[in-house]
Image: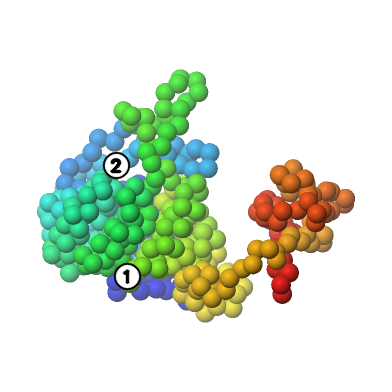
């Protein structure tokens, strides 16, 4: 089973890495990630002037995670002292930089000796596509290193900006950054839980995964350069979905903050287990699989029905409680009333034992 891939002549083994953020904010945090099965290290975004990060700046919320961090609070001078040590950790090092063309022009010559690739964060560039292209052009003109461009979901037309990055010389697209602004209010005080003056933060975690997955799926159909999927990944299941959607590798942040760096080990093992169960020699055999499936096979939804495997059902009633058509009864096991069932599929996703399946009656 092969978990190795090549992006921009950088070997990732496995094709998982942290996303730019607090997971690699200094040498010690980089060292902690390097002791796992991560395939590369990505630094927190470095810029010319360090920001004053409001506090509190991170919080777990229902379904996700909020943060109001901006970029690295470490001055460039400290990064230039740390990067030689981080480089010796024997993992490909992707250095995240921001934000304007002028910033990039000054930063690249100083950090290039330590980087295997440069990731451009575009989160604060806004929707001005000329400024976006200028930043990519400037980066390409200052180095022969691969340039990865990380897209903000707030761009007016993600596909247009991704194609502009490719045409400007980008070597890979990283999709997608956190969503927002978003807000949660503390009930006791009435104040927002984020310490930013606006009270706003950026949303990440499981809540954004389906949107990030859709973005990767759509971008993969129009780009020639590799896509690195990021957003809401918390297990091997999401990694596999990203690969099926067209990603060549993935980045992980929120779940590695909440569960700790060892999540990279769990996900790498989960990828191996999936390949073994499906008799696959490498994960690239499933890259882009979903588009191929949809292109080659149309589904007639009128011919679909729901079936319950009584041997697996333990009558927990989750399916019955949530059925909006009142089509499920519990008689030792769950039973489907075919006249009432709308085949909406909700019960399939609710069943914790995999006892409910879609049946294509045309087969």
Name the residue located 51 percent from the left edge and 73 percent from the top edge: 295
The number of numbered discs placed on residues in the rendered structure image is 2
Asked whether, in this view, residue 171 is left or right of residue 214, the answer is left
State yes or no: discs 1 and 2 in contact (Cβ < 8 Å). no
Residue identified by numbered label 1 = 225
Name the residue located 87 percent from the left edge and 51 percent from the top edge: 332
The numbered dot on residue 70 is: 2
Name the residue located 42 percent from the left edge and 33 percent from the top edge: 183
Residue 89: tell me if it is visible: no
* Between 349 and 336, the one nearer to me in the picture: 336
For the residue carrying disc 2, how many other residues have a C-alpha within 10 Å: few (<14), some (14-19), or many (20+)? some
Q: Name the spot of residue 242 as percent of width and height, x first.
A: 47, 63
Residue 60: tell me if it is visible: yes
Q: Nearer the viewer, mark 1 or mark 2?
A: 1
- The kind of secondary structure element at disc 2 is loop
* Between 264 and 154, the one nearer to me in the picture: 154
Q: Quadrant of residue 246?
A: bottom left
The numbered dot on residue 61 is: none
Q: Is residue 188 above or below residue 1?
A: above
Q: Name the spot of residue 314 as percent of width and height, x first.
A: 80, 53
Query: Which callout, 1 or 2, points at the residue further toward the start of the chain?
Result: 2
Mark pair 1, 2: CA separation? 28 Å
* Between 361 and 7, the one nearer to me in the picture: 361
Asked whether, in this view, residue 185 is left or right of residue 308, the answer is left
Q: Name the spot of residue 23 as percent of width and height, x first.
A: 37, 50
Asked whether, in this view, residue 343 is left or right of residue 147, the answer is right
């Amino acid at each position: 089973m092969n978990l190795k891939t090549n992006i921009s002549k950088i070997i990732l083994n496995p094709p998982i890495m942290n996303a730019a953020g607090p997971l690699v904010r200094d040498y010690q945090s980089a060292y902690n990630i390097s002791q796992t099965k991560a395939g590369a290290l990505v630094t927190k975004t470095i810029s010319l002037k360090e920001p004053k990060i409001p506090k509190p700046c991170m919080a777990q919320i229902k379904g996700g995670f909020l943060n109001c961090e901006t970029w690295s609070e470490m001055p460039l001078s400290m990064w230039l002292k740390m990067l030689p040590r981080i480089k010796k950790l024997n993992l490909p090092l992707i250095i995240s930089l921001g934000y304007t063309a002028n910033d990039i022009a000054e930063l690249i010559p100083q950090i290039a000796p330590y980087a295997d690739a440069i990731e451009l964060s575009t989160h604060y560039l806004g929707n001005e596509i000329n400024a976006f292209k200028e930043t990519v052009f400037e980066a390409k003109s200052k180095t022969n290193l691969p340039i990865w461009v990380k897209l903000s979901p707030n761009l007016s037309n993600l596909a247009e900006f991704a194609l502009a990055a490719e045409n400007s010389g980008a070597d890979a697209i990283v999709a997608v950054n956190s969503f927002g602004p978003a807000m949660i209010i503390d009930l006791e005080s009435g104040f927002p839980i984020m310490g930013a003056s606006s009270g706003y933060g950026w949303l990440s975690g499981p809540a954004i995964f389906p949107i990030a997955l859709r973005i990767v799926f759509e971008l993969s159909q129009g780009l020639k350069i590799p896509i690195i999927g990021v957003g809401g990944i918390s297990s091997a299941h999401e990694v596999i979905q990203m690969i099926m959607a067209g990603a060549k590798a993935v980045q992980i942040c929120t779940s590695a903050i909440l569960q700790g760096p060892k999540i990279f080990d769990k996900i790498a093992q989960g990828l191996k287990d999936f390949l073994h169960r499906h008799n696959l020699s490498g994960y690239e055999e499933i890259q882009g699989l979903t588009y191929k499936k949809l292109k080659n096979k149309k589904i007639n939804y009128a011919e679909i029905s729901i079936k319950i495997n009584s041997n697996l059902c333990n009558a927990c009633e989750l399916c019955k409680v949530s059925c909006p058509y009142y089509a499920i009864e519990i008689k030792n096991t769950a039973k489907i009333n075919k006249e009432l069932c709308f085949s909406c599929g909700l019960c399939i996703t609710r069943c914790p034992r995999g006892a409910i399946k879609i049946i294509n009656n045309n087969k």
